[in-house]
Image (cartoon, helix red, strand yellow):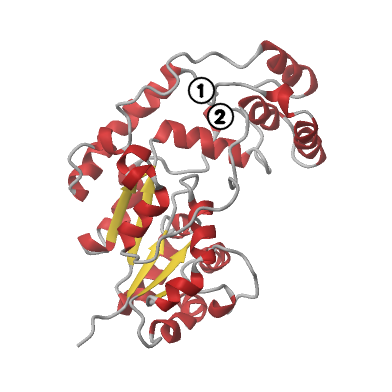
Amino acid sequence: MAAAPRLILHCGLHKTGTSTLQFALARARPALAASGVLYPTNRALGIDLDVNDHNPLAERLLAAGGDNAAVDQLLAPLAGLMATPGLTSLILSAEEFSHVFLNPGARAAVLDALATFRPTLLYYLRRQDVLKEAVFAEVVKGLYRGPISGENHYEYDLMARFTPLLTRLAPDQLKVRPYTRRHWPEGDLLADFGRAVGLSVALAPPPWPLNQGLPRPLTYLLAAAPAGRVKGRIKFFHQLYPALFHDRHRALTPPAARAAMLAILAPGNRAFARAQGIADIDDFLDLTTLFEPDWRPIAPAFAALAEKRFAPL
């Protein structure tokens, strides 16, 4: 008897190459289907949107919360897709799944609805101090205004994030991979993902970088600016004069504050490593590498501009 097809939910985390992976999966959709792997379009899931990822589904699942009937309806198309002849794996990819599985009601309802498929949840983990910088640079593009020290859009504690899943899923249903280039085959994230989910088709990278991080001065000014037109004008000015925003550093947070953050998270890292059988969590997260040991504060001109034009950070 043929093995049942696998349902793989790639859940991010955010800022771990998800846009690149989703572009590559969407581009390889015909070749993947020919090999028995389905990366469904959103339209196949009943959502009339043409995007590379499945975040629209994840966002609707999160909005449904603990409403089991609504969640069942949103996930109903999966039953037909999982019955596709010759199917070996079905992959959904949405970094917003990471928020779905942090919400108690949505988590329970989604796992209940998918229990018959025994899904595998795949996460890429990035060292938390660097992740916080990247997440901050993303949220300041929108409504967030304030210092990075006050940013609380994300759950950085691994045990707080994963304990609800560890208590609900079998050990082999939660799969984590490091967002660390030296741990990937030939330093290639796409090759690592392919190996992690058992693809026989090689994924090709996009022809241009996707969703690149912002230069540090731009992040700083956006964090100080009110949402709306002011942020838009700053981003437009950066597009016109990118050289003015050049900065070889990435971190807004001083090394001492980053070290303090990692020290607070270290017990959770170790507990998660024991739960997942990770021999060296510091190596897994690349915490053994010093991140910007030559760090310098933001240029005084940008700090002065932010203080003069906006509320000081």
The residue where tag 1 is placed is 253
Q: Is residue 77 above or below residue 149?
A: below
10 Å crowding of disc 2: few (<14), some (14-19), many (20+): some
Q: Three-letter amino acid code at disc 1?
A: Thr
Comparing 188 with 18, the one in front is 188
Q: Three-letter amino acid code at disc 2?
A: Ile
Query: Which residue is depicted at the point 35% across and 65% down?
Result: 199
Which quarter of the rendering shows the C terminus? Answer: top right
Query: Which residue is depicted at the point 68% across and 16% down?
Result: 303
Q: Is residue 183 left or right of residue 61?
A: left
Comparing 67 with 50, the one in front is 50
Query: Which residue is depicted at the point 39% across and 65% down?
Result: 201
The residue where tag 2 is placed is 148
Q: Nearer the viewer, mark 1 or mark 2?
A: 1
Q: Is residue 32 above or below residue 16?
A: below
Which quarter of the rendering shows the N terminus? Answer: bottom left
Q: Where residue 222 sits: x, y (%)?
A: 69, 32
